[in-house]
Image (cartoon, rainbow, N blue to C red):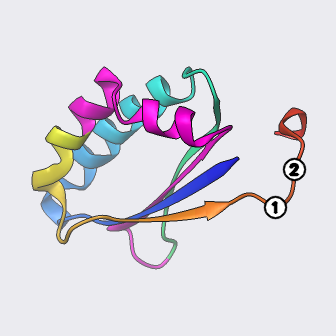
């Protein structure tokens, strides 16, 4: 199982547009085969900072996500909303190690 944490800083004038676009990406992502979680969270003390927490059953499932129409649409749409380039950091899941517990 693999996790990617994507750190995003959004321009203030694009806040609502970013949230709307990312919510649509979330809705598509959670329906993907091999998706365990796809969470969008906003930093409590900085409303322009976000974390997307993506968990997939395998490297293959994570790679397939990058080919989906909803992801490609999101990536193109939100590029101009970002105050700085997004940063994705990959992690391996240690616990829970049973996909049924997700």
Tell me the SS state at disc 2: loop
Magenta stretch: includes residue 59:
yes
- Horizontal side of 88 relative to 99 (left or right) equals left
- Dot 2 crowding, Cα within 10 Å, few <14, some 14–19, many 20+: few
Q: Are marks 1 and 2 in contact (CB under 8 Å)?
A: yes
Where are the magenta residues, as a range? Answer: 45-74
Looking at the image, which residue is at 45% across and 23% down?
28
Which of 19/4 is in front? 4
Where residue 8 sits in the image (x, y, percent)?
34, 64
Q: Distance between the Cα atoms at labels 1 and 2? A: 6 Å
Task: Please give the residue where the numbered disc 1 appears in the rendered image.
Answer: 94
Task: Please give the residue where the numbered disc 2 appears in the rendered image.
Answer: 97
Quadrant location of the C terminus? Answer: top right
Establish if 90 lies above or below 73: below
Where residue 96 sits in the image (x, y, percent)?
87, 52
Please identify the quarter of the rendering in which residue 35 is found.
top right
Where residue 70 sits in the image (x, y, percent)?
32, 25
Establish if 17 lies above or below 27: below
- Dot 1 crowding, Cα within 10 Å, few <14, some 14–19, many 20+: few
Which of 38/64 is in front? 64
Numbered mark located on residue 56 in the image? none
Tell me the SS state at disc 1: loop
Count of numbered badges drawn on the protein:
2
Residue positioned most to the front: 60
Looking at the image, which residue is at 56% across and 20% down?
31
- Horizontal side of 79 relative to 92 (left or right) equals left
Looking at the image, which residue is at 38% across and 68% down?
47
Establish if 34 lies above or below 7: above
Looking at the image, which residue is at 55% across and 32% down?
61
Residue positioned most to the left: 80
Which of 51/36 is in front? 36
Where residue 81 sits in the image (x, y, percent)?
16, 55
């Amino acid at each position: 199982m693999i996790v990617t944490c994507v750190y995003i800083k959004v321009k203030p004038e694009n806040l609502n547009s970013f949230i709307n676009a990312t919510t649509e990406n979330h809705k598509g992502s959670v329906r993907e085969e091999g998706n365990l979680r796809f969470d969008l969270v906003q930093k409590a003390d900085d409303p322009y900072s976000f974390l997307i927490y993506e968990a997939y059953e395998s490297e293959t499932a994570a790679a397939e996500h990058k080919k989906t129409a909803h992801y490609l649409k999101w990536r193109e749409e939100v590029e101009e909303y970002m105050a700085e380039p997004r940063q994705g950091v990959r992690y391996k899941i240690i616990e829970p190690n049973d996909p049924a517990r997700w």
